[in-house]
Amino acid sequence: MSGPAPVPRIAVVGAGSLIGEALIAELDARAVPRARLFALEESRTLGRLADRGGGEESIGDVDTFDFGDVDLAFFCSHAASARRYAAAAAAHALVIDGTSAHRDDPAVPLVVADVNPHILDGFGPRGLIALPGSASAALATALAPLAALAGLERVDVATYHAVSGAGRAGVDGLAADTIALLGGQASRGRPFGAQIGFNVLPFVGSAGPDGVCAEERRLIEETRRVLGLPEFEIGATAVRVPVFFGHGLAAHVRLARPFTLADAAEALRQGAGLRLIEARPGEPAPTPAAAALAPDRVYVGRLRIDSSRDRSLNFWVVADNVRKCAAHNAVSVAQILVNRAR
């Protein structure tokens, strides 16, 4: 009779990033067993952490780290680090890549724990898994119960991205803009290339020759993959808004089969990782500020029939992009894999 599986040794690459810090907090909050935790950053980032006055003594250098010493590794910050080290680390350990480095690789599973955990069936004790971007994770989580109810024909979605989607630089940029503008000074336009304080920017990432920006393209491709619907029609507009944490999405969905509003509401109530905010007194529509205070769910509100189109719904989605869609999803995927190994 075999004994219990060993407690994993865990590495977090990008431990000084917003997502890295949230991921370590999530591991602690769930009391995930571990033999040891290695908090890692690139050499150049270690210098910046030292300049900020914290973290440099407890965070090691990924550039000199031996991934043969761990059983589970999370990549949380720079895609460049994941491109450089994740595949090699996957030869020794389970690697969960939350960066954009491997999301578009069809050979790498793309997973939202609340939506498509079945694609992890048969996954071994080592290998590489990718996580989608936060807006894609939130959208797929909200759409999955409706897909099961009546099928999906098309969604048109506008996303309202919090600045934390650009990391600590995005948070610092909004803070600096707000202080400067309230003091009567000009915005420096960092790091978004334009004023973000008291403004909205109708793009997230650079636009291609077709006018589609990087985040819109990612949202379309990743949502299709997570839902397993490669032909699903998605129209997307990505907007950056002056909010620190919590992405919002306005979704207009056409289903494939007839349904009632009560059917749709019940499907969303039962959806994994979801909470439907009912349209009644004392239950306001979800907002980024509220989601950031309770970041364990994707929240759906303002659910209503779209009378201008057959079989159509309109609703609003909010989720904490750093904690729920990134850190929480990463740890959930890890727990699925570790629990199966036991």
Image (cartoon, helix red, strand yellow):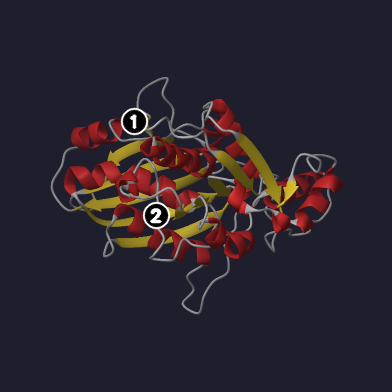
Q: Name the residue under label 2.
A: 157
Callout 2 amino acid = Val
- Residue at 46% in and 77% down: 210
Which corner quadrant holds the N terminus?
Answer: top left
- Residue at 56% in and 47% down: 74
Classify mark 1: helix, strand or loop: loop
Q: How crowded is mark 1: few (under 14 residues within 10 Å), some or many (20 or more)?
A: few
Classify mark 2: helix, strand or loop: strand
Residue 143, placed above or below residue 35? below
Residue 111, placed above or below residue 220? above
The answer to whether residue 79 shows anywhere in this view is no
Q: Name the residue under label 1.
A: 1
Left or right of 163 in this view: 96: left
Callout 1 amino acid = Met
Picture coordinates of residue 170 (x, y %)?
A: 68, 51
Picture coordinates of residue 65 (x, y %)?
A: 69, 53
The answer to whether residue 117 shows anywhere in this view is yes
- The foreground one among 215 and 289 is 215
Report which quarter residue 110 is drawn in.
bottom left
